[in-house]
Image (cartoon, rainbow, N blue to C red):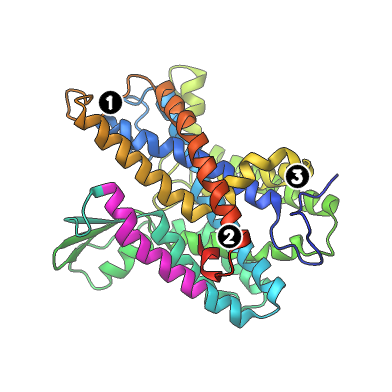
Amino acid sequence: MRPAISEGAQGLRSRIVSIDALRGLVMLLMLVDHVREFIYLHAQVRDPMDLSLTPPGLVLTRLTSHLCAPVFILLTGLSASLHAQKHGDRRATSVFLVKRGLLLILMEVTLVNLAWTRSLVPPVLYLQVIWAIGLSMVVLAALLWLPRAALIVFAAAVMLGHNLLDGLVLQPGDTGYVLWSILHQRGFIELPWGGARTSYPVLPWFGVIAAGYALGPLFAGAVAPAPRCKGLLAMSAAGLTAFLVLRCLNGYGEPVPWQTGATSVMTALSFVNLTKYPPSADFLLLTLGLGLALLALFEALPAGSLGLLRTFGGAPLFFYLGHLWLLRLLHDGALALGLGGPSGRIEAGAPLQIWLVAAALAPPLWLACRWMVGLKRRAAWSGLSYL
């Protein structure tokens, strides 16, 4: 097998193509989901989805996006580990993670919320995935000082054990409500000008980013591609097997039990219809199991075949901000032209339209990312690395 390695790499690789390619793939799936958010505002899905009300096509469209956050945060931890290997300095990596994490939190409450709400001071501030990634990076800045064995134990305990805390539900005004709303319970935090909704409780994501960091030695320069792929596939098989066992037992690991549907398709959809906010143990086992299998696949493929995906993954924050603002401009422009539906919003008639719109937006976004990746390679300013 040929390792998917960046050109010109010597010793520790500055960028690993398989990682950028997998990041690019989940970013494209995120694009599909955010197109759904903008043009399906009249028919939002719940978490998990109500299969009696949500068309199967829309269910499948939503399910594909479930890979995005877990895989992206896992790769964030892995990239942090490679950063530490490259520089040989955990302190420098900790400082980098804190700076990058705080930047992401700032981005969430400014540019990202502005794109979603059209207001810098909206009545409701949504703390979503960029916020969760930012806080996870800040926490990882401390966790990376643990021995690797302790880090693995922490990651497994948090990812698989946090559902034991589901019964702890606090109400506004209770001691610890704000902290618990940030960590594990979706809630509304009162602010002087309105409030903040913790759409992405962060505790399980701390386990995911720690697991990604613990993967780092598998990608050290001394590890050959074949053993790396074998290790990734073994972990993938273990995760998917654990998911199947827990889900078949229909007990611990997922708050919403699956049910036999009117057809085999509806039963299968119920089986994989999992809780994302916060991500259940079953949700993480399934998505990370699939993500590790994809990473092994991309490691085995020739680097040249991954060029398109790699370009998207080479400028993740630039892509994230760019695609949100592109969707916002297109949405508002269409409304200005009188193209809204009866609800006063852009409405799609079928899930296929979501995929077609996303496919149409991907090429200009790829060109923009290619420009940014080239700029990052040429420019001397280290701040571009944050994009």
Please state which amino acid type lies under the numbered disc 2: Lys
Q: Amino acid at mark 1?
A: Glu
> What secondary structure is the stretch in magenta mostly built from?
helix
Magenta-drawn segment? 97-116
Is disc 1 surrounded by few (<14), some (14 to 19) or many (20+) residues within 10 Å? some
Label 1 sits on a secondary structure element that is loop
Judge by depth and name the residue closer to the eye, 382 or 52. Answer: 382
Q: Please tell me whether mark 3 or mark 1 is closer to you in this view.
A: 3
**Badge 3 vs badge 1, beta-carbon distance below 8 Å:** no
Mark 2 or 3: in front is 2
Residue 347 got which mark? 1
Secondary structure under the numbered disc 3 in the rendered image: helix
Identify the disc placed on residue 303: 3
Residue 212 in view in this figure: no
Which residue is denoted by mark 2 in the rendering?
376
Relative to 213, is 373 above or below?
above
Residue that sits furthest to the left in the current view: 193
